[in-house]
């Protein structure tokens, strides 16, 4: 579930975010920076357990390699 958060930052920070990250990417950028500091370590364990699922990993690898096989990279 997504939640809205209002924060205040210095005008230079605001302008820099929009200049370097892009207007539609600020939320994702901030979430990526903050997540490791606030999401419990249990989530990392869950990702590790998912990686142990062989069928899922095979499908994920096929999906991620498809663009290279088609010459799109």
Image (tube, rainbow, N blue to C red):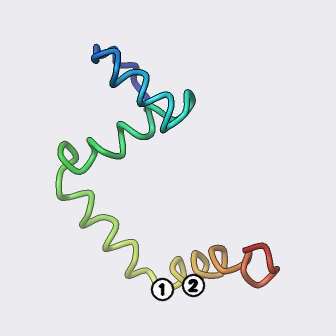
Q: Residue at x 42, y 30 (%)?
A: 17
Crowd class of label 1 (few under 14; some 14 to 19; many from 20; radius 10 Å) = few
Is label 1 in a helix, a strand or a loop? helix
Residue holding disc 2: 58
Residue 63 horizontal side relative to residue 14, left or right = right
Is label 2 in a helix, a strand or a loop? helix
Q: Residue at x 23, y 51 (%)?
A: 36
In the rendered view, tell whether residue 6 sits above or below residue 13: above
Residue 59: name its quadrant. Answer: bottom right
Q: Pick the residue in front: 17 or 7.
A: 17
Q: Pick the residue in front: 6 or 43.
A: 6
In which quadrant is the N terminus drawn?
top left
Q: Pick the residue in front: 72 or 16.
A: 16
Residue 10 placement (x, y as % from top left): 28, 16
Residue 60 placement (x, y as % from top left): 57, 75
Residue 11: name its quadrant. Answer: top left
Q: Residue at x 80, y 80 (%)?
A: 71
Residue holding disc 1: 54
Q: Pick the residue in front: 15 or 7.
A: 15
Residue with the most extreme right position: 70
């Amino acid at each position: 579930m997504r939640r809205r958060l209002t924060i205040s930052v210095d005008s230079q920070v605001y302008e820099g975010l929009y200049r370097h990250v892009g207007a539609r990417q600020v939320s994702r950028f901030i979430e990526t920076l903050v997540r490791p500091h606030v999401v419990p370590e249990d989530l990392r364990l869950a990702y590790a357990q998912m990686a142990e699922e062989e069928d899922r990993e095979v499908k994920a690898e096929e999906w991620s390699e498809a663009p290279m096989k088609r010459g799109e990279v």
